[in-house]
Image (cartoon, helix red, strand yellow):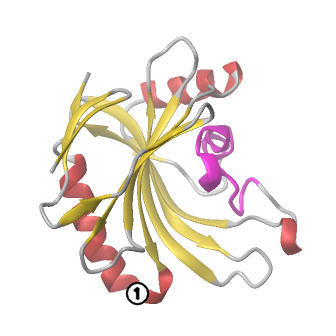
Amino acid sequence: MDVLNFGSIKSVVLPNDWLADSEQNTGVMKMRCFHPRAHDDVEIAFFQKMQGVLESAIKDFREILACGPHKIVEGGTELIQLSPVMGNAGNHQWSNKTRGPRGPNFRYTLGEIIDLQGRKVLRVKGSFVEPESKKPQNEYCGIFIDSGSENNLVQEVYLQVPSKYGYFQFEKYVDAFSETLSTIVWT
């Protein structure tokens, strides 16, 4: 199944046994989701907010991307600088030190700048958690793309799998997600 023309993505091929959900397109965001036949609560999503991030955030993002492939160190300056472009995944244990219900809802485990089909992107892995109990809700792997536009748009393509399926099932889906990303053709 091909997805065509989603922001800076000209095309991408999803696994054959995945189904498309209806596209959501509002004045605030645009999103297309896909799920495997076996689990409609597992998704690969293509997401873009229609308003850009702050000038300072996109400047930091572009400077970090320009450094080329490298790991983003837990608790390091780059991770804090990247948090504003990471959407919900930016509310993690290194950017939000609050405890209780206003605490971080994302547990950051890995970040890196990678070269994906000739373009530098930020790749992030972790778990969305319940802020008070820290109990994992959803496992996450996603990429963040500088759309290159003058309005500072950042696109996100992510895989989200309920934690109830376990780590090995999540990693199986990460393999399918990685294979999908390897088919991206940029505009």
Q: Is residue 94 above or below residue 68?
A: below
Give the residue drawn at x 63%, y 53%.
88
For the C terminus, the quadrant is top left
Q: Position of residue 42 (x, y in %)?
A: 38, 71
Q: Can you name the residue that lies furthest to the top here?
A: 150
Q: Position of residue 3 (x, y in %)?
A: 23, 41
Magenta stretch in the rendered image: 77-95
| Identity, as a three-letter code, of the amino acid under mark 1 | Tyr
Q: Residues within 10 Å of mark 1 (few under 14, many from 20)?
A: few
Q: Is residue 107 above or below residue 23?
A: below
Q: Is residue 149 above or below residue 134?
A: above
Reply yes or no: does residue 91 show up in magenta. yes
Residue 98 placement, left or right of 184: right
Q: Position of residue 68 (x, y in %)?
A: 38, 32
Residue 14 placement, left or right of 167: left
Reply yes or no: does residue 12 show up in magenta. no
Question: Toward the viewer: 109 or 29?
Answer: 29
Q: Secondary structure at mark 1?
A: helix
Q: Position of residue 114 (x, y in %)?
A: 34, 42
Q: Which residue does the numbered mark 1 point to in the structure image?
A: 165
Give the residue drawn at x 41%, y 54%.
158
Give the residue drawn at x 75%, y 85%.
133
Question: Toward the viewer: 45 or 53?
Answer: 45
Q: Can you name the residue that lies furthest to the front here?
A: 22
Quarter of the image where one finds residue 8: top left
Give the residue drawn at x 51%, y 48%.
72
